[in-house]
Image (cartoon, grey):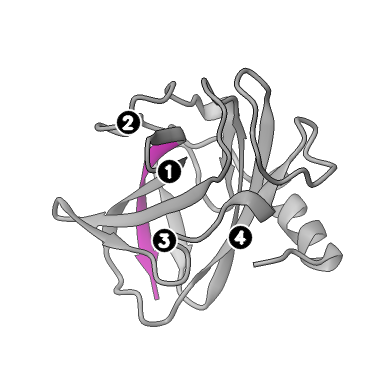
């Protein structure tokens, strides 16, 4: 999903208005745990993300891989009652088009070098078919060998 300049400005404005959400480490991930200052999601106050159906939310995160990554794929799931459910259209897709330099200004894509800081920027639609439910969102970026970055946050999907 490519962000055009108008959508990017809207996303940037939303991110500027959002407050940091307390992110949690992914239980099975060996990547360094991200902090609230490294992740920003629109409509996510400190306690829980409120995601309204038929809207679009934006995400920006700083990642600093501990090893080189030739490719980077998205592992984006909603966890409802301990059951992980892939987000249609996002789970398993390439994250490379959404990788920017540390400042978040220049798209750099893949590969990623160990120890270098990158910015991941994307947006995702809250589809009308999603149930109105409380859930945990699992957002991982990695390859078959492991994660470059991963976090989980509490969320609620509303009508």
Query: What secondary structure predominates along the stretch shown in magenta?
Result: strand
The residue that mark 3 highlights is 91
The residue that mark 1 highlights is 140
Which quadrant is home to the N terminus?
bottom right
Which numbered disc covers residue 123? 4
Residue drawn at 45 percent across, 77 percent down: 127
Closer to the camera in the image, 144 or 131:
144
Q: Where residue 93 appears, x then y in whole percent?
A: 50, 61
Which numbered disc covers residue 29? 2
State whether residue 33 is above or below residue 75. Answer: above
Contact check, label 1 and label 2, Cβ < 8 Å: yes
The Cα atoms of the two marked residues, 4 and 2, are separated by: 23 Å
Q: Earlier in the sequence, mark 3 or mark 4?
A: 3
Residue 84: image quadrant is: bottom left
Q: Residues within 10 Å of mark 2 (few under 14, many from 20)?
A: some
The Cα atoms of the two marked residues, 1 and 2, are separated by: 9 Å
Residue drawn at 84 percent across, 67 percent down: 6
The Cα atoms of the two marked residues, 1 and 4, are separated by: 15 Å
Segment tinted magenta in the rendering? 150-159
Q: Earlier in the sequence, mark 1 or mark 4?
A: 4
């Amino acid at each position: 999903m490519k962000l055009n300049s108008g959508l990017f400005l809207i996303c940037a404005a939303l991110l500027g208005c959002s407050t940091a959400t307390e992110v949690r480490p992914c239980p099975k991930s060996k990547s360094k745990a991200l902090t609230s200052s490294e992740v920003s999601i629109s409509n996510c106050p400190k306690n829980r993300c409120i995601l309204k159906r038929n809207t679009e939310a934006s995400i920006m995160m700083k990642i600093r891989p501990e090893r080189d990554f030739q490719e980077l794929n998205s592992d984006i799931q909603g966890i409802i009652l301990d059951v992980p459910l892939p987000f249609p259209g996002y789970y398993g897709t390439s994250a490379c088009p959404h990788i920017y330099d540390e400042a978040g200004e220049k798209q750099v894509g893949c590969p990623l070098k160990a120890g270098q800081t990158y910015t991941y920027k994307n947006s995702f639609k809250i589809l009308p078919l999603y149930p109105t439910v409380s859930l945990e969102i699992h957002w991982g970026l990695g390859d078959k060998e492991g994660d470059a970055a991963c976090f989980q946050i509490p969320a609620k999907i509303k009508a």
